[in-house]
Image (tube, rainbow, N blue to C red):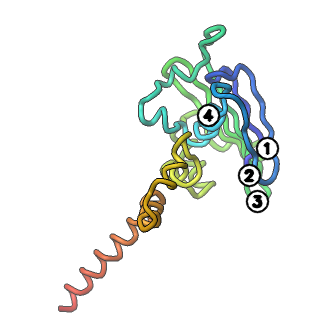
Amino acid sequence: MITKLKLNNWRSHLNSELEFSDGTNCFIGDMGTGKTSIMSGICFALFGTFPELQSKKLKLEDIIMKKPKKQDSASVELEFNIDNDVFNVKRFVEKGHTTAELRKNGELVESPQPSKVSVEIERVLKINYDLFTRAIYSEQNQLDMFLTIPKGQRMKKIDELLAIDRFEKARSTTKLLVNKCYS
């Protein structure tokens, strides 16, 4: 469970600290107040990227605060619990360069290479970026897509989003190979 998020010079957040409670947490605010930046900060903390960055709608430098005063760096820090362990991941962004560190119960687990931190987080969470962005993180205006899918195609789309369709393809291919071997 995510327990705390700190954003420094992160897009519209000069110095924001959020604490999460058990259950569902909701962000409510006017357009442009930083709700999406909170979600992108969580995703970036965990995986070193987020959908807008991955799709190149934004450059890495764009996440560093520019207004009211241009900043030189940004950071995001996320604390989460798994079982009885407290994990803390920090990612730092300077013009075109990132570093990261992961701690478990205060002890350094991995640092400073962001890719190694991401691999370790994927191992701990048992989920990768693709599955996270498909099943957990949904960009603004993506949820209403399910309302517009015709009734008979919703399960197929959910299977595609969760990559379950790959298992069906593998099963079909395996079945064909088995049949060829026994013919």
Q: Earlier in the sequence, mark 4 or mark 1?
A: 1
| Vertical placement of residue 130 versus 97, above or below | below
Residue at the spot of label 3: 83
Q: Are marks 2 and 1 in contact (CB under 8 Å)?
A: yes
Q: Earlier in the sequence, mark 1 or mark 3?
A: 1
Q: Earlier in the sequence, mark 2 or mark 4?
A: 2
Q: Position of residue 133 (x, y in %)?
A: 53, 48
Mark 2, Cα crowd under 10 Å, few <14 / some 14-19 / many 20+, is few
> SS for tag 1?
loop
Label 2, label 1: how far apart the Cα atoms are = 9 Å
The disc at residue 1 is 2
How many numbered circles does the render carry?
4
Q: Are marks 4 and 1 in contact (CB under 8 Å)?
A: no
Q: Amino acid at mark 4?
A: Thr
Identified at 50% across, 25% down, the residue is 60
Mark 1, Cα crowd under 10 Å, few <14 / some 14-19 / many 20+, is some
Identified at 66% across, 41% down, the residue is 102
Q: Spot the residue most to the top.
A: 69
User: Residue 116 versus residue 62: which sits nearer the camera?
Assistant: 62
Q: Earlier in the sequence, mark 3 or mark 4?
A: 4
Q: Amino acid at mark 1?
A: Phe
Direction from residue 159 to residue 13 in the image, left or right: right
> SS for tag 2?
loop
Label 4, label 1: how far apart the Cα atoms are = 16 Å
Q: Position of residue 125 (x, y in %)?
A: 62, 55
User: Residue 66 versus residue 97: which sits nearer the camera?
Assistant: 66
Residue at the spot of label 1: 20
Mark 3, Cα crowd under 10 Å, few <14 / some 14-19 / many 20+, is few
Between marks 2 and 1 in the image, the one whose residue lies nearer the viewer: 1
